[in-house]
Amino acid sequence: MSSHRGNKPLGRLLALGFCVSLLGVGACGNDDGLTVTAEAQASCVGEEPTEAMKLAGAAMLPGRVCGACHRTGGQAQNSPWTVSGTVFSGKNSPCNSTEGLPGVFVEILYGQDDPMGSYRAGALQPNGRLKTNSAGNFYTAQKFVAPMRARICESTGADCSSATRVATMTLKVGSDPVTGATQRVDCNLCHYASGQALTRIYLP
Ligand code: HEC
Ligand code: HEC
């Protein structure tokens, strides 16, 4: 991962994000312009991030919608993730917990057969094997073919296909329903109790 700045304390900057609009536009400004927006917080209902979670870097803001900032034109546009999220140990783990699960493989699979016959639905995509870090976070800027499916597991093998603890998503994601164009996949966007998936991404 190219790290131009590395970890730095953003607590103050993030805290300023909550001062919002009483004093009008610009009152909460700072050099990075970093604010924990409602969009980023949507998957962590009622949980303000702790100071430790506000450190910019791989373990930041677990459970939050990474792509609210890590996208073209976003607050972290130098690291636009194509796929990102957090694996937790519990079905309904709070974002502000120690339940982020490290060492879990997150695999990005093809969602359908290649019309030209070069890959099959369900096969692992190139560079599609990610591993969760100490916070349970995973992220990548690699390009994938949409639609895609996802599978998570704990495994010592070459992929999740022979793992004993594995969970596979049936839903295909990453393509615009109308145009079919490839879209950023924010796994945390759907994975919370009142989101589309109704659960965290977790390993049963
Ligand atoms: C509120 C905005 C925001 C959210 C949400 C957010 N980040 Fe960040 N992140 C930043 C900023 C700002 C930086 C530092 C500037 C940069 O790297 O572009 C950063 C830096 C990083 C870096 C270091 C990148 C590098 O090249 O050095 C990683 C890794 C990272 N974030 C991962 C994540 C993950 C994973 C999530 C979701 C679980 C996430 N971030 C959520 C704003 C955010
Ligand atoms: C558009 C919303 C949405 C997005 C984005 C999304 N998911 Fe899901 N996910 C769901 C829904 C709905 C289900 C339950 C039905 C199913 O399995 O398809 C699910 C189920 C799962 C399951 C299986 C859970 C079980 O019951 O065993 C896993 C694992 C999973 N998702 C991982 C991921 C990962 C990893 C990502 C990001 C690459 C992701 N999801 C992105 C909506 C989403």
Image (cartoon, rainbow, N blue to C red):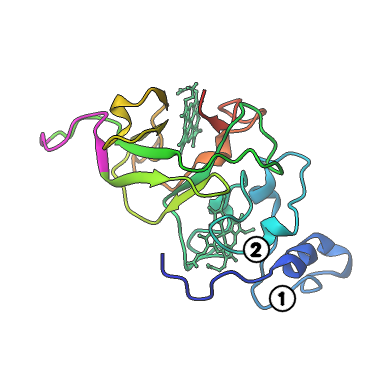
- Look at mark 1 in the image and give the residue it sits on: 30
Residue 38 in percent (x, y) is at: 70, 50
Q: Amino acid at mark 2?
A: Leu
Residue furthest to the right: 22
Quadrant housing residue 20: bottom right
In this rendering, position of residue 56 left or right of residue 30:
left
- Look at mark 2 in the image and give the residue it sits on: 55
Q: Nearer the viewer, residue 191 or 115?
A: 191
Question: Residue at 29% of width from left, 25% of height from top?
Answer: 162
Label 2's element?
loop
Question: Residue at 79% of width from left, 66% of height from top?
Answer: 16
Question: Residue at 47% of width from left, 68% of height from top?
Answer: 78
Please tell me whether residue 175 belongs to the stretch shown in magenta: no
Let me know if residue 170 appears in the view. Answer: no
Image vertical order of residue 130 relative to residue 141, above or below: above
Residue 42 in percent (x, y) is at: 67, 42
Label 1's element?
loop
Question: Residue at 63% of width from left, 71% of height from top?
Answer: 8
Q: Nearer the viewer, residue 37 or 103?
A: 103
Magenta segment range? 116-125
Please report contact status of discs 1 and 2: CB closer than 8 Å, yes or no: no
Q: Amino acid at mark 1?
A: Asn
Residue 52 in percent (x, y) is at: 70, 58
Q: Quadrant of ligand 1?
A: bottom right
In this rendering, position of residue 21 left or right of residue 43:
right
Q: Quadrant of the N terminus?
A: bottom left
Measured in 3D between alpha carbons, the distance from the residue under mark 1 to the one under mark 2, in whole angstroms, is 16 Å
Crowd class of label 2 (few under 14; some 14 to 19; many from 20; radius 10 Å): some
Quadrant housing residue 74: bottom right
